[in-house]
Amino acid sequence: MRKLVELADVCWEGLTLKHVEHRKMFFPYILFMAIAFLFELFLLGLLILSCILFYSFHVQPNLEFYISFLILILMLFITFSVLRTVIKKLNKMIL
């Protein structure tokens, strides 16, 4: 179990650019994460539209639809937390 926790810590350090000190590296990464976040919001909008259409036509979605909804929510949470952490680190470097 300890190895799994260490692996998760290393992944988080890589995603949040913990060991990167060069400021020019942050701007493309922040741009990439912001575009990924906007794309995930677009997908969330499509899922909500699908829910509305399923409800209006009295169709029951299958299990894969609900699983994809949960995975998208998890991806949104991870992307937002990584983006927030990287922006905080960049603000500390600038100030």
Image (cartoon, helix red, strand yellow):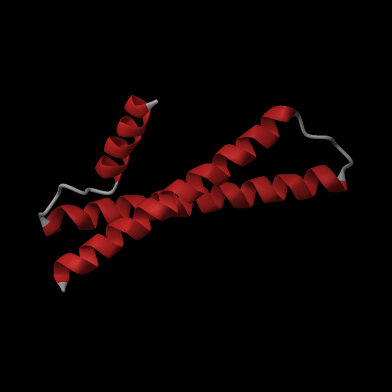
Which residue is at the far bottom? 95
Number of marks in the image?
Answer: 0
Quadrant of image for the C terminus: bottom left
The answer to whether residue 68 is above or below residue 50 is above
Across and down, in percent, residue 89 comes to 24, 61
Q: Image check: 85 left or right of 66?
A: left
Write the residue at 61% across / 40% down.
70
Quadrant of image for the N terminus: top left
Q: Image check: 88 left or right of 46?
A: left
Which residue is at the far right? 58
Write the residue at 86% across / 48% down.
56
Q: Quadrant of residue 27?
A: bottom left
Write the residue at 29% across / 62% down.
87
Write the residue at 72% across / 44% down.
50
The answer to whether residue 95 is above or below residue 82 is below
Which residue is at the far front? 2
Q: Quadrant of residue 84?
A: bottom left
Across and down, in percent, residue 61 comes to 78, 34
Across and down, in percent, residue 62 comes to 76, 29
Which residue is at the far left? 22
Q: Image check: 18 left or right of 9?
A: left
Across and down, in percent, residue 86 comes to 28, 56
